[in-house]
Image (cartoon, helix red, strand yellow):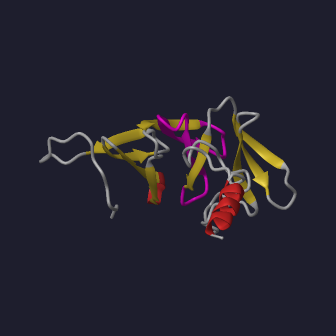
């Protein structure tokens, strides 16, 4: 009996297809990432970002009509939506192959690419938005404090440590 049960489980598990790495494929059935800050100056109800792999483009889509309301960028490699800014104007995404992704921020009002923090390996950079459209990007080389509107980036490092690879447990 155990052999029969094991055989059925093995046969059923053959139909469960998982990507080789969780970031290699974006789940088309994933829940949309709406801007959660409904009091943000640029908040738009029912609008969410979507990466379209076949078209290689990042768009904003209306949940109620399924219509594309805005094309933010085209000719993009694999893209993973990360987080909205507190005013719902800027959108942080991870772009590139899973082995070496960049954190990129787009202005969803002007469709401008605001800049990037390069070289995340197998795990997109953790990002934390703060007031005044500051973004902290946690990288292997330190935390990057980024004033997105001005494009100014400053890497925060520990002056007492000679280690170049850093890990973070939290940001205060």
* Quadrant of the snapshot with the N terminus: bottom right
Position of 143 relative to 9 (above/below): above
**Region of the chain picked out in magenta, as a range:** 85-112
Residue 111 among those drawn in magenta: yes
Position of 30 relative to 144 (above/below): below
Which of 151/53 is in front? 53
Asked whether residue 31 is in view, the answer is no
Q: In the image, what residue occupies the spot 30% across and 51% down?
A: 167
In which image quadrant can residue 162 be found? top left
Which of 93/120 is in front? 120
Residue 79 in the image: state x and y as whole percent.
Answer: 61, 41
For residue 105, side relative to residue 62 (left or right): left
Position of 154 relative to 37 (above/below): above
Residue 136 in the image: state x and y as whole percent.
Answer: 40, 51
Which of 146/167 is in front? 167
Asked whether residue 99 is in view, the answer is yes
Residue 18 among those drawn in magenta: no
Q: In the image, what residue occupies the spot 71% across and 34% down?
A: 56
In which image quadrant can residue 41 be found? bottom right
Residue 106 in the image: state x and y as whole percent.
Answer: 59, 42
């Amino acid at each position: 009996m155990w052999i029969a049960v094991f055989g059925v489980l093995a046969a059923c598990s053959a139909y469960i297809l998982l990507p080789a790495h969780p970031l290699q494929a974006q789940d088309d059935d994933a829940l949309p990432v709406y801007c959660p800050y409904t009091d943000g100056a640029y908040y738009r109800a029912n609008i969410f970002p979507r990466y379209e792999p076949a078209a290689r483009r990042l768009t904003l889509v209306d949940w109620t009509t399924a219509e594309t309301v805005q094309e933010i960028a085209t000719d993009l490699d694999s893209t993973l939506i990360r987080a909205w800014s507190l005013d719902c104007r800027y959108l942080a995404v991870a772009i590139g192959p899973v082995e070496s992704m960049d954190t990129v921020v787009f202005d969803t009002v002007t469709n401008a690419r605001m800049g990037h923090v390069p070289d995340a390996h197998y795990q997109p950079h953790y990002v934390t938005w703060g007031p005044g459209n500051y973004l902290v990007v946690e990288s292997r080389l330190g935390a990057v404090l980024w004033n997105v509107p001005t494009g100014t980036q400053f890497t925060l490092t520990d002056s007492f440590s000679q280690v170049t690879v850093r890990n973070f447990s939290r940001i205060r």
